[in-house]
Image (cartoon, rainbow, N blue to C red):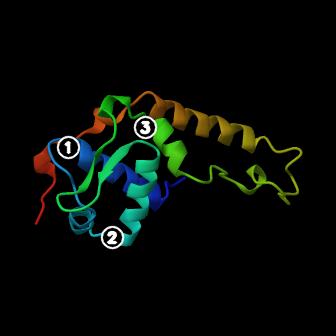
Amino acid sequence: MQLSKFTDYALRMLLLAASHPDRNITIREAADLYDISQAHLKKVVLHLSRQGYLASVRGHGGGFTLGMPADQINLGLLVRSTETDFALVECFQDGSNCRIQAECRLPGILDEAMRAFLDVLDRHSLQDIVLRPAAFSFS
């Protein structure tokens, strides 16, 4: 399993905002820092803002900051809000054509593994992974 780029970028935006609580971060700064297109990051920031994870300010001096305290941003809930597909194998999808699906025990094991993965994330908040501001180098 691999998290989507959208989730990866969402985590990066939240880490950046949490590590700089004293200022607004612009999408341009974040794009330059991470070498990611501004268009991609705009979509991520919009999603995170709609979910309440980020607060965005338009205009001169604008940018984004955390929309709630880092200790209230649960990583499991965040990942669930950014990932669109947890179907690890074909038989998890509607309309599966797997010929051994009726007898196969693998889906139960994979489902258990996915629940364990999310359970671990559920036990952590953004506060658990916040970095020092010096970890980020703005040009």
What label does residue 75 carry, if any? 3
Q: Residue at x 51, y 50 (%)?
A: 82
Q: Residue at x 31, y 34 (%)?
A: 70
* Badge 2 amino acid: Gln
Q: Residue 48 placed where, x, y %?
A: 42, 49
How far apart in space, not on screen, are marks 1 and 2 (Cα)? 20 Å
Q: Residues within 10 Å of mark 2 (few under 14, many from 20)?
A: some
- Disc 2 target residue: 38
How far apart in space, not on screen, are marks 1 and 3 (Cα)? 16 Å
Tags 1 and 3 in contact by the CB under 8 Å rule? no
Q: Residues within 10 Å of mark 1 (few under 14, many from 20)?
A: many
Q: Residue 91 placed where, x, y %?
A: 78, 52
What label does residue 19 carry, if any? 1
How far apart in space, not on screen, are marks 2 and 3 (Cα)? 24 Å
Tags 1 and 2 in contact by the CB under 8 Å rule? no
Disc 3 is placed on an element classified as: helix
Most foreground residue, 26 or 127: 26
Q: Residues within 10 Å of mark 3 (few under 14, many from 20)?
A: many
Q: Residue 121 placed where, x, y %?
A: 46, 35
Single out the mark in the foreground, 2 or 3: 2
In this rendering, is residue 69 above or below 49?
A: above
Disc 2 is placed on an element classified as: helix
